Amino acid sequence: MMLAIVVVATAAATPTSEARQGGTFRIAFQGLDYIDPALSYSSQGWALLDTTCARLMAYPDKPPPAGFRLVPEVAVDFPKISRNGKTYTFTLRSGFRFSDGTPVRASAFARAINRTLAPGIRSAAQQYTQDIAGAADVQAGKTQTAAGVVAQGNGLVVRFTRPVPDFAAMTTMPFFCAVPPTLPADPEGVGAFPAAGPYFVSEYRPGERVVLRRNRFYGGKRPHLVDGFEADLRATSVTEVLDRVERGDADWGGAGAPEYFEPGRGLAAKYGVNRSQFFVKPGLILNALYFNTSRGLFGNNPRLRRAVNFALNRRALARLVSASSLDRRVTDQYLPPGLPGFRDADVYPLERANLSKARALARGTTQGGKAVFYVPDLPQPLAFAQLIKRQLAAIGLEVELEAIPPRSLGGRLQAEGERWDLTLSLWVPDYLDPYAYINLLLDGRFVPGTNLARFDSPKYNRLMRQAGRLRGQDRYRAYGELDVRLAREAAPLAALSFFNEPTLVSKRVGCVVLRPVLDLTAACLK
């Protein structure tokens, strides 16, 4: 459901003496889904759109913790939220302009929302906009503007049919970038269009290239040092992308994490780690073992869930699936390290199991000692599950593995009456907010959707919803405490690791800011 490109900053900055203004930053991609903010839903598309985007709310182009804190961008301040949590009121600051010189008004954000709902538009943003009042009328072609979206001058009101405590954080996604109020909604996606961020798309040839140029009317404060970007979309493989960057034919490119850690490429040996070209920083993708808390074995049985957490050897699991020690960071908590409010509490052992503690907790709770483990029918997940099976045998749990085709697994896990007790899953939020890790995973209102564990505790539902209504430092502090408390007391899932995010740049790139992929807007050339 969710994609891991969010506005998060982790920096390793080149000294100012090596940085310069100007120049064209070259990018290598294996194609691109869309450059249209209503339709793009890929890491490559969002990396480019981030440079063009002016948002109501944003995350600063700075290292953490500042780079993880939600702040107003085009909005004057945080939105006013109604007591029932259904209505958001934003006031916009003046000074922002599109690349054609026209001023940015509230109508630019209203149009962005309504474009995601237009008939024929298959926008992934609809998971976030479909609960806006009147959204269904736009989707049905009865009107072009949702009744719940009202723009007047510099004032924007968005009204939902249910409480949405995380909408301010949602507006950091490219779906909600300011767009010209007359920009059409094209099912094939628009190409070049005026933008209100530091850069705009000046040329787009699908399957060939994208050219971004400076917005000379930009009125914000984001860094924008290069003259523009040229993205070649014709790379035929990840290997070719990385080869181009190493040769200096591209300054950066899109590649999956495993390819960076291939022993034959030897990036860490060539360049070192976190020095000048090869970087490995904490990522945001959570790998976890989920308990089915609606079923007999683990339902209303937090002692057994905690016993499993103590019985797992997280380090051994990490070594099993990766030859590199750089690709992930083992964890026992649900919030990613570095997020404001995160507190490393050492809830469960990370380097080895604590079998004495695990057996003591498991005693008298195993209910016959059998658990059904649904696992994707793929070599790596099956090997991972086999090791978990052996680890849990030490506390008297006999685990039955049921291999299921990946295309069928999601539906089976969501269906009522399925016999699973354990499963593995990755969690990849689209936007950075503790709500996306805590509430979406564990609040009972999201059963059976994103709450795969089917965890529905009145006590924790109340605490999660209270935290969701807070903002600023109070919000981060509440979620940090809730993260530890959930893991230690309720243990609805066993967090295993967060994947690290690798990045390779050419030797001429400076001002490297990672969020967790490269922040192109903040980049400079030496």
Image: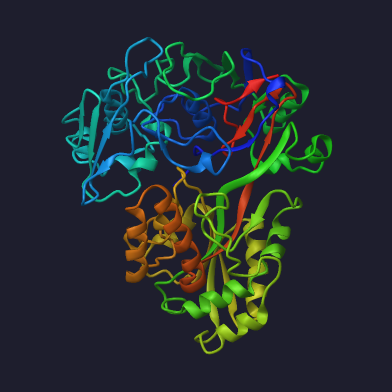
Relative to 189, say whether 71 is above or below: below
Is residue 100 visible in this depiction of the protein?
yes
Relative to 94, say whether 10 is above or below: below
Identify which residue is drawn at 37% across, 61% down. Answer: 464
Identify which residue is drawn at 42% across, 76% down. Answer: 299
Of residues 429 and 139, the one drawn nearer to the viewer in this rendering: 429
Is residue 4 visible in this depiction of the protein?
no
Left or right: residue 310 versus residue 138 is: right
Where's residue 248, x and y in %?
75, 21
Left or right: residue 148 versus residue 203 is: left
Where's residue 377, x and y in %?
59, 58
In which quarter of the view is residue 232 placed? Answer: top right
Where's residue 207, x and y in %?
54, 20
Identify which residue is drawn at 37% across, 57% down. Answer: 467
Where's residue 109, x and y in %?
30, 28
Question: Looking at the image, which residue sits at the far bottom?
Answer: 364
In which quarter of the view is residue 149 placed? Answer: top left
Of residues 368 and 308, the one drawn nearer to the viewer in this rendering: 308
Identify which residue is drawn at 19% across, 37% down. Answer: 148
Of residues 61 and 166, the one drawn nearer to the viewer in this rendering: 61
Left or right: residue 316 versus residue 191 is: right
